[in-house]
Amino acid sequence: MKIGARARWRAGVVTVAAAAMIGLSAVPAAAHVTVNPKEATVGGYARLTFRVPNEKDNASTVKVEVTLPEDAPFASVSVKPTPGWTAVVEKRKLATPIKNHDREITEAASKITWTADAASAVKPGQFQEFDVSAGPVPEVSQVVFKALQTYSDGEVVRWIEEPKEGAELEHPAPVLKVVPKAAAAASPAAAGNNAASGAAPASSDGGNGWPLGLSIAALVVALAALGLALRGKPTAAQP
C-alpha cells in the first residue's frame, strides 16, 4: 500500500512535468520580419522600422529586400543609414501620378535593398533593424511590405504571404495598418508615430505577444499543479 501511494505520487509529478513541456513546445515561434509601428494615419509621415531576426544557427543574414506596393505608393521615402549596411532605393514610374505638397509625383520608391559588409551580417541569435521615413501614408486599409531575407549560405526566405482571415501563415509579410484621420485621435499608437521623427515602438515578437503569454501560462499551471502534488505527498505509514 505504501509503495503504491508513492508510485502514484511520482507518476503524478512526471505527468505534470510532461504536460508543462508539451504546453511550452506547442507554442509556435514568432521570429519573422516585421514592421513597427503596426499602424499609421492616412496622410501623415511614418517612421517605419523593419526588424529582421536571424532564424538560422549556421548562417548569417547578409541582405534584406523590402518591396513597396505599387497600388499604395509613398511620395517620399528616405532611409536612415545603418552602420555596416549599404542601402539602395529603386524607383518606378507611376501609372497614375500622385499629389504631394501641390507637386505632381510621377515616380515613387518600389524597393529598398540593404546589403551587409563582411563584418556586419546578422549572426545567429541576433537581429537588425532598418529605419525608413515614408509618407504621406496612402489612403488604403493596409500596406503590405513583401520582404526577402538572404543568408550567407545562399538561402532566400520569402516573407511575402499576405494576411488572410483565420489563417496562420508560415512566412507572413510585414503589414502596416492604416488608420483614417478621423480615427487617429482614438489611436495613440497611430497618432504618436505620425511624424517621421517619432520613435517607433518595437517588440521582440513583432507585436504578437501571445506565444510568450501561453508559455508563461503553461508554466504557471504546471508549477501550481506540482505544488499541489508536493503538498499531497503521502507520508510513511505508521507501524
Image: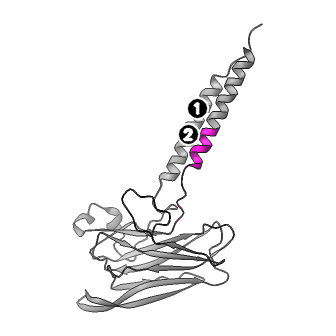
Q: Is residue 22 magenta?
A: yes
- Mark 2 residue element: helix
Magenta-colored span: 18-32
Residue 141 as seen in the image, left or right of residue 79: left
The kind of residue on which mark 2 rests is Val
**Mark on residue 220?**
2
- Left or right relative to 107: residue 18: right
Residue placed most toward the observer, 236 or 41: 236
**Residue at 67% across, 29% down:** 11
In primary-sequence order, the first of circles 1 and 2 is 2
Residues under numbered marks 1 and 2 in contact, where contact means CB atoms less than 8 Å apart: no
Q: Residue at x 65, y 68 (%)?
A: 124
Residue in view at x 47 percent, y 79 percent: 66
Return the residue at label 1.
225
Outermost residue to the top? 239
The image shows residue 30, relative to residue 52, as above or below, that is above
For disc 2, the neighbor class at 10 Å (few under 14, some 14 to 19, many from 20) is few
Q: Is residue 116 above or below residue 24?
A: below
State the image quarter where residue 36 is shown: bottom left
